Amino acid sequence: MKVIGLTGGTGSGKGIVSQCLKGAGAAVIDADLIAHEIIKQGKPAYEELILYFGKQILGEDGEIFRRRLGEIVFRDKQKLEFLNRCTHRYIAQEVASQIQECKEMKKAKLVVIDAPLLIEAGLAEICDVIWVVYADEEVRTRRIMQRDGITYETARARIGNQMSWAEYEGYAQEVIDNSQTVEEVQKQVEMLIKKYA
């Protein structure tokens, strides 16, 4: 069983690649989904985040309002660093647990960790190979604006808060170009599955 780390900047289209991999029978571990779970009431990161950011990040239901938290951290690098430090260790624990489960149950030949902050969270170390999804910055900006209903400036700021393409490329054993059509992406994914499965 091979462990693939799938990453790329916001708006690069990792979700499409992830769906193609799932469709081809790979076991996909969604780090974003785990990140949503670990900040819920009663979960490990919840209290730590409230202690640091205060109750201003809570919605009426008492849960952390992720959009409000995002607005705070994407304007302040120190606060973003704290959020990442706090959540990454819990994400890493859960990812390791899910990989172990896949191994024990022999779920698939490929296990994919779909993680926007794969490198930053220290998850690259548990991967056999890293695939990075690429898309031109303007394409990414438009996608983020459409996806999150935000301005051009806010979308660019989010991209600016992440690693540069040169940094991502430095970690990549494989690059998937997602600047064109979904069909093009599927072809690339199929070739990579043949190579690694």
Image: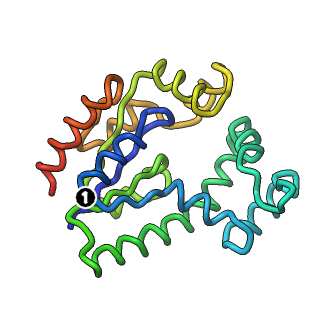
**Residue 140 drawn above or below residue 126:** above
Q: Is residue 184 left or right of residue 73?
A: left
Q: Nearer the viewer, residue 17 or 53?
A: 17
Rendered-image quadrant of the N terminus: bottom left
**Residue corresponding to mark 1:** 25
- Tag 1, which secondary structure? loop
**Residue 181 drawn above or below residue 6:** above
Residue type highlighted by circle 1: Gly
Rendered-image quadrant of the C terminus: bottom left
Residue 59 percent across, percent down from the top left: 83, 54
Residue 33 percent across, percent down from the top left: 53, 58
Q: Which residue is drawn at 80% across and 59% down?
A: 52
Q: How is the image coloured?
A: rainbow
Q: Which of 147 and 114 is in front in this view?
A: 147
Q: In this view, does 24 lie to the left or right of 85?
A: left
> For mark 1, does the 10 Å Cα neighbourhood hold few (<14), some (14 to 19), or many (20 or more) residues?
some
Question: Picture quarter containing residue 3?
Answer: bottom left
Q: Is residue 55 left or right of residue 196?
A: right
**Residue 38 drawn above or below residue 195:** below
